[in-house]
Image (tube, grey):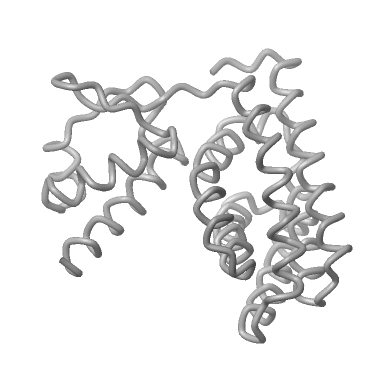
Amino acid sequence: MAKRESLADKAYDKLEEMIVTLQLEPGLVLAEQELGETLNIGRTPVREALHRLAREGLVLILPRKGILVTEINPGKQLLLLEVRRELERLMARTGAVRSTDAERKSFRRIAKSMRQAARNNDSMKFMRHDHELNILIARSSHNEYAIRAIQAMQGLSRRFWFFHYKQAADMPLMARLHAELAECIADGDADGAAAASDRLVDYVESFTRRTVTLGVAV
């Protein structure tokens, strides 16, 4: 069982990254067997990973037809941000209070890397550390219910960003906002972390609305 769960996690991580980075594009219909062959992982772990991705809204399972990669929708992204704002503020505040010494050290390391990404306008470095920071903020909240809730939203948000950031985003600013949030949590500044979280979501919301204004195709 442990091996199967490990393979399912591996399949999930690979498929989630492929969907978020648009290697598997919105509207594409997938087949379990082909995915298993591509990943070199058996069909049962792949099926488990796909059901997890379906719960997160990244794919839609079509009985007897295949697996559809869901479309990107700015309107739905704005609704998602309403929930993310409250959850992320909560996790930032509690993380500032509950983080372990090891977690605070990781926050400082990520903040440093984010500032480097901002200076170098390095979008891939930002993407890697953004994902790592999301996971760390959730874990440092030490609230299993908040963790479960936010996990269901992160993939959709990261994919939306990846799809649109070149046309509508200020990536260095985004990286600096993440760095500020990580630094506040590392410093144990609960109020500062909550405010930094709000500033970050404010920017993400304005970025999302800008994609509509620019009429970027989805």
Q: Residue at x 64, y 20 (%)?
A: 75
Quadrant in the picture for the C terminus = top right
Position in image of residue 31 (x %, y %): 18, 31
State how many labels appear: 0
Residue 2 vertical position relative to residue 150 in the rendered view, above or below: below
Q: Position of residue 154 (x, y in %)?
A: 54, 45
Compared with 206, 45 (above or below) is below
> Taking 33 as reference, is 67 above or below it?
above
Residue in view at x 76 percent, y 23 percent: 210
Left or right of residue 82, residue 8 in this image: left
Nearer to us in this view, 9 or 99: 99
Q: Quadrant of residue 169?
A: top right
Instruction: Give the left or right position of residue 2, taking residue 188 as reference.
Output: left
- In the image, what residue occupies the spot 70% across and 69% down? 95
User: For residue 209, what is the image quadrant?
Assistant: top right
Among the 4 quarters of the image, the one containing residue 61: top left
Q: Is residue 108 left or right of residue 20?
A: right
Tell me what residue is drawn at x 62 percent, y 28 percent: 77
Considering depth in this image, is 13 or 198 the residue closer to the camera? 198
Quadrant that contains the N terminus: bottom left
> Which of 85/33 is in front?
85
